[in-house]
Image (spheres, coloured by chain):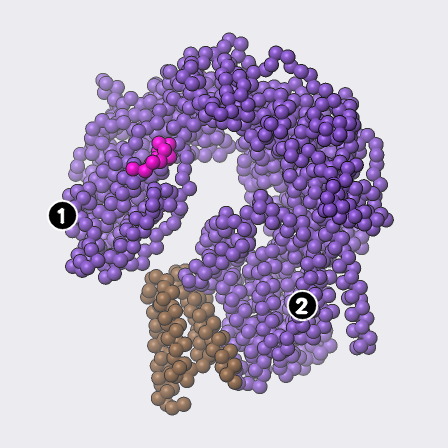
Amino acid sequence: MSERHVSITLLSQVIFFCLVVGDIFIFQSNSDTRLFLLAFLWVARSLRLPVTYKDSMKFALVFLVLIVMEYLIGQPQQVIERTALWVYAFLFIGTVQNIVALWRK
Amino acid sequence: MEKIVAFIVRKHIALVAILLVLGAIPFFWFKPGEVNIGGDSSRLYFYDPLNYLKNMALYSVAPGTTGYEAVSYFFAPFVTLFIVLKKIFISPGLVTNVFHGFMLVTAFLFIYLTLVELLRRNSVNNRTFIFFAGCIGGLFYIFGPPVGNWDKAITTHNQIFLNPMVFFLFLKFVITDNPLFLILILLISFVFSTSFSYIAAPALFSFYPFALLYLWIYKKYIVKTSFRRKTLVCFLLMFFAIQAFHLIPQLSILLNKSSYEFKHVFTSEGVIYGLDFFTASSQGIKLSKNLALIVQIDPIPVFQYILFVFPIIVVLGLLIGPSDGPFPKRKLNHLILTCIFLIVLFFDTANITNTGFLFYQLLFRLPGFAMFRNYYGQFSYVLTFFYALVLGYSLYAILGVATKRIRILLYIALPVILVLYGWPFITGYMVKLPVLGSRDVVVPQRVDPNFEKTLQYIRGIPTDVKFLTLPLTDFGYQMLAGANGGLYIGPSMIGHLTGKNDFMGYNAFAPFEQIFFDRIKHKDYKSVQLMLSLLNIRYIFYNSDSYIYDQFPGFPYNNVRKFFPDQQSVRDFITRLGVTSKSQFSDKYHIYELSGPLYLPSIYAAAETMYWNTLFMDSMLHNFPVSDNRLAIYNRVVDVSVNPGIDALYIKPENNSQYLDLFRHRKAEKAQPHISRSLSWFFYPLVALKEKNDLRSYPFVNDAYIDRSIFYSDKRISELDKWKNEIPILGDVTNIEKSEKEWREPALLQFSRFKEYNRWEISLVRYRRIIRDLLTQLEKSNASKSSLLTVKTDLKGVLASQHRRLINIVKDSNRDKEEKPYLWNLIDTMYEDIGSQLRYEFPSATHGTYSIEGVPENALFDVFLEREGIDDYTTSDVELSYSGRKLTPRKESEGKLINFGEISLSTESAGPITLDVLAPRNLAKSAEWSSHDFTGENPEGNVTLSIDNSVDSNLGGMTTKVMQWRPKSYYLISLDYRTSSRTFILQVYEKDGGADWATRQMVNDRLKSTEWSNFQAIVLSGDHAQSAHINIFYDAERKEVENTDTGPKPSIEVKNVFVSRILNPNIILRRKKTDIERQKVLPTIEFQKINPTRYNVKLSNVKEAITLVLSQAFNEKWKLVDVRKDTNSFRGWLSRQAGKMLQFVTAPFVSPIVDRVAEEYYSGTIREKISQQVFLTKETFDTWGKEVIADNSHFPVNGYANGWYVRPENFGGRDTYEFVIEMTSQKLFYGSLAISLITFFGVLVAAIFFIINYVQRHRI
């Protein structure tokens, strides 16, 4: 994997992280379209970039920890639920990616 | 340390120790002798399994209230298990503890074994890691998140241990293909058939589809073999055969289109009920809490967060371990389990994306899916099961890569966390929580030995009688204090453990509950006696313990306490009922008897048959005293041509006066608009077009059209609410009404006008247009006057609430000081215009119309008017007319009734009767207004209320009390008013006479008119209302809106206040008695109850046709069977052969019947033999294939019971008949039980064979 690929992958992760955080904290409405679109783009990255299921699982882990932190600092329930939706989405995507990876081998 | 752990693991020391500790935990929950046997469905089988089996599990007639049909056969094997346990352990407390210990041990053990089996097969064995992962999975399953439910689970839901047990056995079968495991599943399913029955359907269908899906995938992709189809088909057939004894009777009920179960499962009624429940309950379920293992309650207890480490482990475990590692099967299995876990998580949460929620709602269209309406409770056990498995896998993965230090940390920390979390459960704190609504009363109790003696006494009563338990509760619970201070709260112990039907609750008297308590309230003990008599109640069990009443200030006595505020009032009631004391056990338990003619045996021939076109109880009891209680009263459904022997005919005309339309509510759809498209959105015109077309698509005005119009009008307001600060204001509109006539919707290509939508005024115009169209369509429609009145009354309420909402939206916006008054003015004038369009003719309150329906034959009828309904008037104040003819009251009026002469009615046309009140009384004639602000009366008698502007609060206004306010009465309230361009509120309040002195608001209307206007309202007072007040005050919420600081003072003038009770008396028509009243010759009846589903009856000296009554809940399955006559059909022949065969097979098990007369009633004309409770007699199958008689003249009588009009020709003209009254659903049970028992013993033999074979092969 070239250094350029690594950089792009890292950059895409940072961008996605920002987008998801923005989706959780900035948008007030709970939009399926936004979630499905972002999730689709997340999966579509793997067509061009060397990403694995581990990226999804890492994101799931980060946002899972965020849920408890949000509960502890008293964030609005809507924000916590949105975070949980992303955990669920990343877990699901990660699991399917992993199965596909196993299948291919 | 790790070596020590490895040694302990190798020798199974730790596992055995854990199992011993778990098994011992329940023994510390209760003190010796204590049990927890209450709850909605109770666990009385822990206490007395034998009697529970005899009275509850073996018959299709419930031992409660009137003996309705209830299939509880599935309890039979399960309760039999407890009979065995009780034989071994003797004490109910010990049985309870042993079984609870077994549940805990089994639940843990099979999760452990499953994880060990799965992990061991797909990876290099590290026994310590596997052991630890298995243990943590098992401990998590029993001490983890569902621990909050365990106080119930430990008592009623066997799925907690059955799910892991059956899953493990299936898994073993999947791996080994050994049929022994399927055979074991069959045997377990038989013993615990309760968990495989109709009532356990939610638990079954929430777990097994996912479990079997996983096992199928496991077999196909991990084990990589396929199932033997023959084995599976054979297993399925055997499963249905072994469960036949409850599935077949239940299926016959389920597939019966008139049954409740059919409606619940297969009709849209069930779907709607399920969806409503689901939508309401889903609001509180949060995905975040399910993911982070936090219970779904608020506020969240701090200790809840300690389980958070487990989801972290789950995700870390998925992260660790490369997919290209040496054990891809283990990883694949881990991922498959995770997938199933995520799917179950979706079903347990429902709120996963809007699309997911919609999909879930769609699933409710599937037949039976409504069982998941309370989905969270049902899927949470399944979720925990898969959570435990995924956790075990993840933990194993982490242990494989963790350093030694981290491993030791995990070995110590994880069990400690789980034990800490489960500590309230381990210590038994959770099973000792105070009972709902009590003053710290706990459940565990030692059953009072004196109550045991009472039960023994009741069991010894030799006749078929019913009990009334006092004090009653709202929900039919038995309340029984334990000898140690605990409490039993659950179903009737008398019913379940003695077999005597028991009435314990307010609802038990359905459909007479209202009238029953009404008669108690009126101290009409004769009527109460007659009702008890007709309900076959002979004994009263009275528990005078003050503990069970005083410790429960609310639940479960909320309703009952209105009639019986304390134990003393219950004692008074018993004293006045004229019952005799029969027996007493200690100073708490008393048994009273309704003796002599007050008691009516469960089978009798009616001395008098009556017909009522309505439920008889509400009018007859206190108006028409009867001399002989042996009544058969037909209600509505009877076909007089089939039963010509009706002695008395009563018709109760129904009041259909127009003012009642004000109280009929439409079933409005309460959908809330979802606002997502801004008014400034470029494509918003498409939204407007869609709405317009949608409303146009309704071919005529119906409820759906009205609901849709209201929905869109709500949507306009919601749009304004959402963008109240952003939507621009034109500022030059003077009147919405005028603009509405001028403004046209932009056409689709008029792009330049699209922005017009984004205006406050245009939104109001569009709102006004929707309301105008709706009102215009309503006026044009051919709806009846009464339904139009109902709709307009409903609309008036909707519009008033929308008006308030719009005013508040403007108030809450950040518009400037000039814009707000401008908008308020537009809104107010718009609603004034709407009000004038909505105006309708107020119905007359002095004219009543009574329609006559259900006249069964042409006859002359006496017209009676109930005096109670007009007791503050004289007969000259009211006028009754029929077909334009004035009816005059007669002097010889009977007691509580006023006779208005006779009228002739025919079956084809009858009525109506009209009632006119000639001089309505004004109850507010001498009313005095009291107020701080009120300035007094002027010479014309007008009352003026003037508000001082300097007072800046919601002012009290002026109030007057209405004299002689009565419960359950209609009142007309009318007054004239004039205001100073300010808005006043008129409210009418009433106060309850009950203990809580509840206040209820009945009217809340705006008064604003600078000209003299009239206000009118009709209200219905509450069931316990005692007084009412009229209150008029300035609407201080509009102080800002109306700018009272600078404008004129708010003042209102009021005159001509008129409050009058609208007369609504009962009118009863009675067929005129013939001159010659023939005395009936009733036969001699001899009967014996064999069991709750069978009575042997002998009638002798039969001279004429009779109406035979069985005082059990009406059911078409109750049949009269002539055992001497064969049914002439192939089916009958087949049935007879099956009966003979079963009679032969069961011959060694039959019980003898004591054939002795226990008691005689009505001078020996009714003889009752000693009542039995025998499951198998030598005659059990003698009705199979025999002729059913008088089936087409089988009707409900007395509001609930079975009545047969039996003619002598039904028995070939003989004067002595012998027959059996039988509940036919019981036959189905006998047949299907035979199938199940044969299968069970067959499977048992097969199991022994396989085990011997296995032992021999493995040389164990």
Based on the displayed image, in which of its 4 quarters is residue B116 positioned? bottom right
The magenta segment: B780-790
Please check the rendered image and state whether residue B782 is part of the magenta-colored stretch, yes or no: yes
The Cα–Cα distance between marks 1 and 2, rounded to whole angstroms, is: 80 Å
Depth check, front residue: B443 or B1244: B1244
**In front: B1153, or A29?**
B1153
Please, what secondary structure does the residue beneath circle 1 have? loop
Of B842 and B49, the residue lying toward us: B842
The residue located at (76%, 46%) in the rendering is B1133
Image quarter hosting the C terminus of chain B: bottom right
Question: Amino acid type of disc 1?
Answer: Asp
Count of numbered badges drawn on the protein: 2
Instruction: Give the quadrant of the N terminus of chain B.
Output: bottom right
Mark number for residue B732? Answer: 1
Q: Is residue B139 above or below residue B965?
A: below
Q: Main secondary structure of the magenta part?
A: helix
Classify residue B91 as left or right of residue B625: right
The brown one among the chains is A
State the residue lying farthest toward the bottom. A2
Dot 2 amino acid type: Leu
The residue at the point 15 percent across, 49 percent down is B731
Q: Chain of mark 2?
A: B
Residue B1217 quadrant: top right
User: To which residue does mark 2 refer?
Assistant: B232
Could you tell me which residue is drawn at 73 percent across and 46 percent down? B1130
